[in-house]
Image (tube, helix red, strand yellow):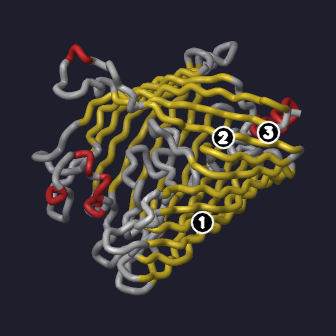
Amino acid sequence: MRALKTVIHMLPCLSLGLAWAAAPSESPYSAPQPPFYGQVRTRTEYDIKGMADTTTKKALLNTQLRTRLGFVAVPSPAVEIKVEVQDVRYMGSEPAAPYNPASATTGNKTGVDLSQGYVAVEEGIFKTALGRQKMSLGSGRFLSTLEWSPTSRVFDGWSANLNLDPGNLTALAYLIRDSSNTLVKDHDVLTGLYYSHQITPDIVAEAYGFYDQARQPTVYAGDTASNADLMYYGERVAGKVSLFAFEEEFIYQGGELNMRGNKTSMAFQLATRAGVVMGNYKANVGVDMMSGDDTPGDDEIHTYRANYYFAHNLYGWMDYFVANPKYGVVDYRADGDFGFLPGPTGNPRISFKPQYHYFMPQSAPSGADDPYGQEFDAEVHVAWFPKSNIVLGAGLFLPDNSAWKLPAASQAFTGAPAAKLLNKDTKKEAGYFLYFMPTFNF
């Protein structure tokens, strides 16, 4: 049963490597689930992302360490239990005050956490999971595990999957945030359905709908003065015809936002791709956009909220658009993936992945619609050993006249006070990002 299901899940992935109609990847329904596994990943960064002036600009040099250990038990043919623990830390951050070098890492326990812990029950084509779990849907534009982050993203709650080959249906209900403080009802609940259908071995179509209900805490009221009731409806088509690859995805965001007055949300996200695939060589051009709002004084908010954001994989690798600016963003992009030197057993493998992005506001008032800037990115991936991936990466952001409109979080790398962050008169400088990230799994 499990072996057959593994083959069914893997077959659609053999032809192109896109997100097929199989069960969602990085979820309780992906196959196979190894009984024992682990990972050690370090990432050394030299980071000057902040675009402040030279008096406040600082470089960050650090090494992050992520260590994972996971177990999957099958106490009966229909029951699966998964437990995964994770330790995340910055190298050299352990000694406690008064920072005695002799103390080193003694006594530290703060870096270890539960990254996954769920029980899953399978009956025929139906499988359901309850607990802490990962979930990545489609291209990850709405929901992703954010594996680039040292901690990644997990969800607490319930999900279920129905294998309707050539279709696949996933339902979920996650408690994103909750508070035990009875005076402040702080919670965020995400529910939804996601359907993926394999039209041909090389073409997949997806449709989904989600309801995101958020209640933010406030010190002035027992419930909330800032809440959101947002509905998301999306569709995606991706695939390959002969040498040509394509992708299109659209997400509509509607509902209500009680932020600075009760307002109606009418926003969207759009992604398009067109490219060529020739063996280990792939090249794409495309346009991505998250809508913005050029009329902030009315009763409608048109700025798209990427609450469970994708980060790094889309809109550039320097993450200036983790939070969508109020005027939105249009990303004119080109990217490639070029594989070289495959060995007789598949290793070593070397691939080169360049990207170019030109960022504009999506909807800005006249006179404030200058470009944000442009970004050049490149990664070299080296798989020297089985289950390994060594990445050398670099990013360069060249700000333009509207770079000061980017969210403050994008400038916080400088460590400067809020008053010294970018404004219209600040001298804008390029941002740099260099990293070395070897990952070893077992």
Q: Secondary structure at mark 2?
A: strand
| Residue that sits furthest to the front in the current view | 182
Disc 3 marks a residue whose amino acid type is His
Tell me how far mark 2 sits from mark 1, CA to CA.
Answer: 30 Å
Whether residue 242 is situated above or below residue 427 in the rendered picture: above
Disc 1 marks a residue whose amino acid type is Ile
Give the numbered dot on residue 56. Answer: none
Give the numbered dot on residue 251. Answer: 1
Horizontal arrangement in the rendering, residue 295 relative to residue 255 (left or right): left
Dot 3 surroundings within 10 Å: few (below 14), some, or many (20 or more)?
Answer: many
| Residue that sits furthest to the bottom in the current view | 298
Dot 2 surroundings within 10 Å: few (below 14), some, or many (20 or more)?
Answer: some
Q: Position of residue 308 (x, y in %)?
A: 51, 55
Q: Which residue: 50% across, 31% down?
A: 86
- Observer-nearest of 440 and 110: 110
Whether residue 1 is situated above or below residue 55 in the rendered picture: above
Horizontal arrangement in the rendering, residue 353 relative to residue 44 (left or right): right
Give the numbered dot on residue 118. Answer: 2
Whether residue 14 is situated above or below residue 220 in the rendered picture: above
Q: Position of residue 172 (x, y in %)?
A: 68, 56
Q: Which residue: 62% across, 47% down?
A: 136
Q: Give the mark toward the camera: 2 or 1.
A: 2
Name the residue tied to disc 3.
Answer: 9
Q: Which residue: 47% across, 65% down?
A: 305
* Of pointers 2 and 1, the one earlier in the residue sequence: 2
Tell me how far mark 1 sits from mark 3, CA to CA.
Answer: 26 Å
Is residue 390 visible in the rendered image? The answer is: no
* Of pointers 1 and 3, the one earlier in the residue sequence: 3
